[in-house]
């Protein structure tokens, strides 16, 4: 299964929309791009394998595999990228600003239900990330 994340990068955070075969699943929030620096940057554009993961802290969520120069990248609940994320991605039901949203746990649960069929078919799950960069002084890069 291939998921597509189309995201817009801003100085204060990154907002995206997650799709499967053109069908909207949820919004995503992340930290701004800071040259892939650990704990302060969103991850680079690319194609990544996803796997189901479980921790006591986040319960059921996803891990993003083989991110260049990074480890421990998760897709977990958070509603404010700058306050709650350290390089991970968070699904949200609604965007409320740059890098902020609402009802993250609800969005993650929806995403996990959506990909359950992938697990049942034993298909690999991939995330394709494509970004546009916005700079208040220059517009779209």
Image (cartoon, rainbow, N blue to C red):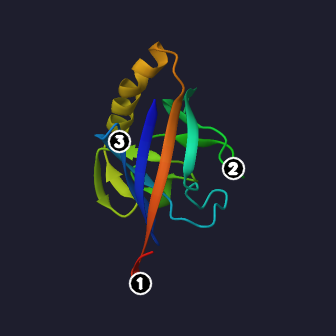
- Which residue lies at the image location 50% right of the left edge and 40% below the top edge? 127
Residue at numbered disc 2: 70
Does residue 51 appear left or right of residue 135 in this picture? right
Residue 112 occupies which quadrant of the picture? top left
Checking the image for residue 92, the label placed there is none
For the residues labelled 3 and 1, the Cα–Cα distance comes to 28 Å
Does residue 4 appear left or right of residue 75 in this picture? left
Residue at numbered disc 1: 138
- Which residue lies at the image location 41% right of the left edge and 86% below the top edge? 137
Q: Is residue 80 above or below residue 92?
A: below
SS category of the residue bearing label 3? strand
Task: Find residue 8 and report its horizontal and vertical position in percent.
Answer: 40, 62
Q: Residues within 10 Å of mark 3 (few under 14, many from 20)?
A: some
Q: Nearer the viewer, residue 82 or 131?
A: 131
The residue at the far bottom in this view is: 137
Q: Nearer the viewer, residue 49 or 63?
A: 49
Task: Find residue 23 and report its horizontal and vertical position in percent.
Answer: 28, 38
Task: Find residue 72 and report its horizontal and vertical position in percent.
Answer: 65, 42
Residue 48 occupies which quadrant of the picture? top right
Does residue 7 appear left or right of residue 34 in this picture? left
Q: Nearer the viewer, mark 3 or mark 2?
A: 3
For the residues labelled 3 and 2, the Cα–Cα distance comes to 24 Å
Q: Are dots 3 and 1 in contact, CB under 8 Å? A: no
Residue at numbered disc 3: 19
SS category of the residue bearing label 1? loop
Q: Which quadrant is home to the C terminus?
A: bottom left
Q: Is residue 78 visible?
A: no
Q: Are dots 2 and 1 in contact, CB under 8 Å? A: no
Q: Residues within 10 Å of mark 1 (few under 14, many from 20)?
A: few
């Amino acid at each position: 299964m291939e998921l597509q994340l189309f995201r817009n990068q801003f100085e204060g955070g990154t907002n995206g929309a997650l799709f499967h075969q053109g069908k909207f699943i949820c919004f995503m929030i992340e930290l701004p791009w800071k040259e892939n620096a650990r704990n302060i940057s969103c991850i680079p554009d690319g194609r990544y394998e996803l796997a189901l993961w479980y921790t006591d802290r986040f319960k059921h969520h996803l891990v993003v595999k083989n991110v260049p120069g990074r480890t421990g990248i998760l897709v977990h609940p958070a509603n404010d990228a700058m306050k709650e994320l350290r390089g991970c991605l968070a699904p949200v039901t609604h965007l409320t600003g740059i890098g902020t949203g609402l009802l993250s746990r609800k969005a993650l649960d929806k995403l996990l239900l959506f990909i359950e069929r992938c697990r049942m078919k034993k298909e690999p799950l991939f995330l394709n990330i494509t970004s546009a960069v916005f700079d208040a002084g220059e517009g779209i890069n």
